Structure formats: C-alpha cells, structure tokens
Image (cartoon, rainbow, N blue to C red):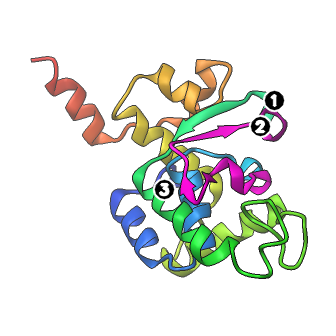
Amino acid sequence: MNALKVLSESQIHILLHNLTAPKDRLLVLLCLEAGLRIGEASQLLQTTLYRNGQPLELITLPPEICKRSRPRAIPTSNRLKEAIQQALDHYWLTLPCALSPYAFPRPNSTTHLTTRQLYNTIIKLGAIHLNMHLNPHLLRHTFATNLMRLCDIRTVQVLLGHKHISSTQIYTHPNSVDLKAAIDKLG
C-alpha cells in the first residue's frame, strides 16, 4: 500500500481555510511552513515567536528543544506571521493561557501541552477537515518537498536541522510535475 507522503496544494488550502482556532492554525503552520518537529513545537516559548507585540522575522530554536541539540533559525512566512499575531491577540493573552510562557500552554498551568497532545490535535484536524490520517511528520515532509521546488537540498537540510543530506533526501518527494519540470529545463 502506497501511503500519502505529502499534502497536495488543494489539501493544504482546504485545511488552512477550515482552521479557525488560532492555536490549531499556528500549530499546523509551524509544522507546514517552518518544518518544526512536534516535540519542538510543544516546547516552543511564545517569546521565540514574537517580541513587543510583533511576530519575529526569524524563529530561533534553542538547542535544548531541538533533536540532537542542533539549534536552527527559520525565517517566518507571511502566513505564519499572521498566525502568530492571531495567537497573540486571541489565544496567549486570554486568562487561562497567560500563566505560561509556552506557545502551547496547558490551561491554568505554567507547563506546556505534551508532544502526544499536539500530535493528537493534528490527527483530529486531519480527520475533521481532510477526512484522512494527518500527522505532524506528513506536514514536515510537505514542508521539505515544497522547499525542494524552490531551492537546493543543502538549504532544505539546514532548515530541517539535519546533520546529513541523506536524512533530508528521505523528506523530499518529487511528483510527476517536478520530474516534467526538470526535463523541460534541459532544453
């Protein structure tokens, strides 16, 4: 059985169009447009995403939340900046969330939601909005594959936080359109 490896543009559009809760939209976009691992997202601090009431141009992930302690900095897309601003205006400043410094806080607590809780949120969103099994890793694969259409594999490697290019290659899934575009560039 051939499992879906990346989301199509139409699936991305449907998913994002239907995400109205600021927390859910931010979570999906952090995986889809910044390539964050779900464990990184769960430990992310609000101050990593904004300062002085404005979304940051660069998300700087500290080594303590990154896999193998490999820190990285990821430029913020316009759509992700909008999601950060919505989270700031309609989620983080609400009373139950104001206690915690984390981007995904537990209600009425100073701790963050667990990796499993955020993973399950994405599964639920995929079932509701796309009628499919969606997981954070599929969003990360989609991020990498979409980047490969725009830049070289070394740039994708750095943005994903991989030590070896061979790890990055696993994340990229060229489709027939990509293959045709490559051949068309020959001549």
Q: Is residue 33 above or below residue 26?
A: above
Q: Is residue 46 left or right of residue 143?
A: right
Q: Secondary structure at mark 2?
A: loop
Residue 157: give x, y in percent of width and height: 56, 25
Quadrant location of the C terminus in the rendered image: top left
Q: Amino acid at mark 3?
A: Lys
Question: Which span of residues is magenta-colored?
Answer: 42-66
Question: Circle 2 is placed at which residue position?
Answer: 66
**Residue 64 lies within the magenta run:** yes
Badge 1: few (under 14), some or many (20 or more) residues near its Cα, within 10 Å? few
Q: Amino acid at mark 1?
A: Ser
Pointer 1 with pointer 2, Cβ within 8 A: yes
Q: Nearer the viewer, mark 3 or mark 1?
A: 3
Q: Is residue 159 above or below residue 57?
A: above
In the rendered image, is residue 1 in sight? no
Residue occupying the point 42% across, 37% down: 147
Q: Is residue 168 left or right of residue 98?
A: left
Pointer 2 with pointer 3, Cβ within 8 A: no
**Residue 58 lies within the magenta run:** yes
In the rendered image, is residue 101 in sight? yes
Spatial separation of the CA atoms under disc 1 and disc 2: 5 Å
Question: Circle 1 is placed at which residue position?
Answer: 69
Numbered circle sitting on residue 45: none
Q: Quadrant of residue 71?
A: top right
Q: Secondary structure at mark 3?
A: helix
Question: Circle 3 is placed at which residue position?
Answer: 81
Q: Secondary structure at mark 1?
A: helix
